[in-house]
Amino acid sequence: MEEGRIFVHFFLFGMIAFAAYDGIRVVRRIFPHGIFMISLEDLVYWLVISLCFFLHLCQVNNGKIRGYVLLGSLLGAWIYYSFCSRFVMRYLTEKIHYLKKRLKKFREMTTIKLNKLRKRKKPEESEKEHEKN
């Protein structure tokens, strides 16, 4: 029965690992990158996932690699990709686009207000300079 518990652990690990990659994919959709940055992100992702896999393997199964560990991870990633990824990507992309638009609008409004304040101060400053002379 221990094998079943470990299989479930790594099944969930595979799902979480692919969900993390979806996060990277969403960022790439919102903020396009060049090939160098994409390659660097992928390298960092795989290094982190490999380290997490190894640490989790040591914690759960004393570092022993078994077929059901690999099968659980791959199956979890595949199930997530097949049934969840499309919806998660769409949802996160829409939410981040919405936040990006709101932040842009907020920035524009604050810039307009700051410009108005600067224009009001300029006549006062010129009067003060005139009085000094």
Image (spheres, helix red, strand yellow):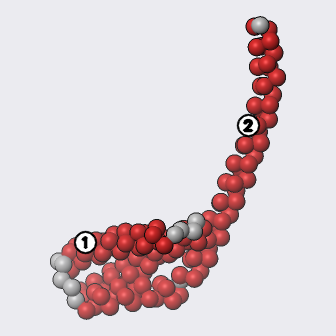
User: Which quarter of the image is occupied by the N terminus?
Assistant: bottom left
Instruction: Please indicate whether residue 42 sits to the left or right of residue 86 in the image.
Output: left
Q: Which of 122 and 13 is in front in this view?
A: 122
Residue at x 53% of width, y 83% of height: 84
Residue 47 place in picture, x, y as percent: 32, 71
Residue at x 32% of width, y 91% of height: 71
User: Which quarter of the image is occupied by the C terminus?
Assistant: top right
Few, some or many residues within 10 Å of mark 1 (<14, 14–19, 20+): some
Circle number at residue 55: 1
Circle number at residue 99: none
Instruction: Please indicate whether residue 114 sits to the left or right of residue 68 in the image.
Output: right
Q: Is residue 82 above or below residue 128?
A: below
For label 1, the SS is: helix
Instruction: Please indicate whether residue 70 sits to the left or right of residue 132 in the image.
Output: left
The reply to whether residue 8 is visible in this rendering is no
Residue 108 place in picture, x, y as percent: 74, 48
Residue at x 28% of width, y 71% of height: 51
Q: Tell me how far mark 1 sits from mark 2, CA to CA.
A: 52 Å
Q: Nearer the viewer, residue 97 or 64?
A: 97
Q: Is residue 21 above or below residue 113?
A: below
Q: Residue 64 appears in which quarter of the rendering?
A: bottom left
Q: Residue 28 appears in which quarter of the rendering?
A: bottom right
Residue 18 place in picture, x, y as percent: 44, 79
Q: Which of marks 1 and 2 is in front?
A: 2
Q: Residue 92 appears in which quarter of the rendering?
A: bottom right
Q: Which of 130 and 55 is in front in this view?
A: 130
Going from the N terminus, do you reach mark 1 or mark 2 first?
1
Residue 15 place in picture, x, y as percent: 42, 80
Residue annotated with mark 2: 114
Amino acid type shown at disc 2:
Leu
Instruction: Please indicate whether residue 110 sits to the left or right of residue 49 in the image.
Output: right
